[in-house]
Image: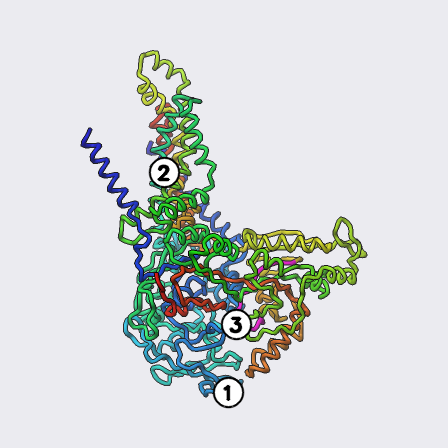
Amino acid sequence: MLRFLLRRLSESLIVLLVMSFIIYALLGLMPGDPIDLMIAANPELTSADAQRLKALYGLDLPIHERYLTWLGQALGGDLGFSRLHRQPVMDILLPRLWNSVQLMGLGFFLAAALSIPLGIWAALKPRSPRDHAINFVAFAGISVPPFWLAIMLIMIFSVWLGWLPASGMGQAGDPASRLQHLVLPVLAMTLLTVGGIVRFMRGSMIEALRQDYIRTARAKGLSQRGVVYGHGLRNAMIPVVTILALNFGTLFSGALITETMFGYLGMGKTIYDAILGNDYNLALVGLLFATATTLIANLAADLAYAWLDPRISLR
Amino acid sequence: MNRVLKRTFFAVVALAAILFGFDPARAGAADLTIGMSQFPPNFHPLFEAVLAKEMVLSATQRPLTVHDRDWQPSCMLCLTYPTLENGLAVLETTADGDEGIAVTYQIQPDATWGDGTPVTSADAVFTWEVGRNPQSGVSNAELFRRILSVQVIDDKTFVLHRDRVEFEYGSVHDFALLPAHLERPIFEADPSAYRNRSLFETDPSNPGLAFGPYKIASVVPGSEIVLERNPTWWGKPPAFDRVVFKTIENTAALEANLLSGSIDMIAGELGLTIDQAIAFEKRHGDRFNVLYKTGLIYEHLTPNLDTPLFQDKRMRQALLLALDRETISERLFDSRQPVANSSVSPLDWIYTDDTRVYDYDPEAAKALLDEMGWRDIRGGIRHNAAGEPLAFEFTTTAGQRLRELVQQVLQSQWRQVGIDARIRNEPARVLFGETVAKRKFDGITMFAWVSSPENVPRSVLGSDQIPTADNNWAGQNASGYRSAEMDSLLDRIEVELDRDKRAALWAELQQLYAEDLPALPLFFRADAFILPLWLKGLVPSGHQGVSTLWIEDWTSDGR
């Protein structure tokens, strides 16, 4: 077990290193830079100014030189300054990371708490009216465009009913205001996530309930509850854990559309703006956070497989 | 079990009370919440001119000079706008023997930073030092380079010695004063790190950074900026106790926030597009006041003049004659965006209507095309004697819905006279970062130029401003327009101090532009301000001076 963990962690470090270069190179391949765009918007800026600013921000150096400089500093613990925000990268990222964890974490928790029981409930009576009703809701959640859902939620709860704020983060230091501002984005995230998990849970549970060991359990006289939760659920959860792990990986990468629509300061919008603004340090560290979380989530999923199914061994 | 149920019930009621206790009106009658679609990336007045930052800083600071709402250069922080006539500007000879000019500015006597320190000439000296230092990273360093020295006369009077005499010698709009008493130690410790360590970045709510009607009270990065009255403000007291700038990037969400009462108004500078505003006015015009103001953003078509097809100016003229720009403006913009005849706005004092005008005339366009040899029409497309089709690529910014709509109409109108424009759009980043900046297009691109009142268009029309690999893609003359006559006009306008003589030169420039068509004029874009009925006194300028420069004139009437 320990060897497995050490091997996976060292593999993850190599993946992170390779990803850091790929991300940096991809950012560098984008046409133009912020100074070019600045010139287009400011008639007063001269070409001499543009050259000076490019040199000042290191944008005139070859991409590999810029990467090696960044890597050297990063290994020394200095992740650099955000070019756009003129603050240390971690000062920008940490609060937004926490915001994303709140939004995505609550959305993830609610979605899992709703979708697993709903999926099981639907699987117990396939093609029944309740299964159709649950499927309808699930497909609606999967198909609805996030921006449309967000606007609908704002229109219903903010414009028509006037119950909740339409967007923003709430007053600093006021938990009630913060909570009010979280409701709509969390609701949007939950509705958008729940459908997929319900479908997986339902399909997986139907498959599990068809297995021989379930028939054996029933033949032994176990109650329906004992059969479903004692024998079916554990096996049915294995594919669902994979989906949950992938969803968990997005906790730190944010939800761009939901964040934009609700004016929520999360990782998705931060990374997006950093990429468009050629803010290498911020974009790179943000994307590496997202990569690291996905790797950790996958590792956690592997551990969960072994716990759910003792036949799976970790070597 | 009952106890559990009771507890659950009370918990749910308490949570609901918190959640649904939201009251949009709680912000208070003395507050004004402005919605805009961009958040300032930083707050330093000399780094990166971003519109959202201008909106905030214009309420907390005041430039020495501005273009006023009548587009005339005037004083804001200074007492009297310096001119040769009033003696505050004096011609002089520089150390190099060139003709320079000494311009005297008197700072408003009561101007005081929010921490009680007077605004003085020492601040002007420090600002100039920061601006000139190549390590500081100031965007518009050209302004500071051209100021040879700053001479302090007294605490409230200083002289800028400039290296060249140009007609706007008194205007120093970008010379935004920095508080020397707070910023100098930080700058002197390490000029190259100043842009990251300045208090404008590390402590933007420091009262010592503001001397306008408001000061920054708090900042929630990316979300909102709260301003409150600055007790040291010397001018007319503003009407609102607090002004909140709230950033909502999506315009549909911005509109929903306005309707829900989360924001009071939408800034015209960074708000809804013109078509969204027109649609909004039709639906909610009884509840809001929608103000339209034509500005200085000039939408046009830039052909690559190195492409043989566009070298004959008759082709450019035919292309323009084939376009019904008036109908496009009427149908798509409710006539809120006027048709342009050249790059000079009709609102600018230098504008002349004594230029060639290209009203929609498809027959004249066809006649010109015939005259140039594009007579053979096959499959609806004209061909020349060599059998080449009259076709080119037509590019604009992908994803900018309104521009793409206009593009489709232009394409169909050209098609009616036998011209095949093939649409190939690109994301803004690619279009401006590569295609236009490095002239990587053979056909026509559609985009906009931003300018200021009486702006000399040297960077877009000068022969020496054509981006090439040799000059490291410097300049914005993307069409590759070369004209000795235009170059001469640009040179002469810049140094002509006599207003009447300059007006005559500007008329010549516009006539030449309308004849040569280095770019095909389309429209001047308009901003739409969505205001509550009770808000009075907001008068958009239409130029780069944002509305908050005059925020103390805004009042709440019958809220």
**Dot 1 corresponds to which residue?**
B93
The three-letter amino acid code for the residue at tag 1 is Thr
Horizontal and vertical percent position of residue B451 = 53, 68
Q: In this rendering, would B442 be left or right of A122?
A: right
Q: Which quarter shows the C terminus of chain B?
A: bottom left
What subunit carries mark 3?
B
Is B267 rendered above or below residue B120?
above
| Badge 1 and badge 3 both on one subunit | yes
Q: Which quadrant is the N terminus of chain B positioned in?
A: top left
The local crowd at label 1, few if under 14, some if 14 to 19, many if 20 or more residues have their Cα within 10 Å, is: some
Host chain of mark 1: B
Separation of disc 1 and disc 3 at Cα?
29 Å
User: Can you name the residue that lies furthest to the right here?
Assistant: B385
Amino acid type assigned to the residue bearing label 3 in the image: Pro
Residue under numbered circle 3: B453
Q: CA distance from mark 1 to mark 2?
A: 72 Å
| Residue at the spot 35% in from the left edge and 64% down from the top edge | B556
Q: Which residues are magenta?
A: B444-457
Q: Measured from the top left, where is residue A189 in percent x and y?
A: 39, 41
Nearest the eye: A74 or A184: A184
Residue A272, numbered label: none
Q: Quadrant of residue B232?
A: bottom left
Identified at 39% across, 81% down, the residue is B79
User: Which-is-in-front pick, marks 2 and 3?
Assistant: 3
Please name the residue that numbered disc 2 is placed on: A108
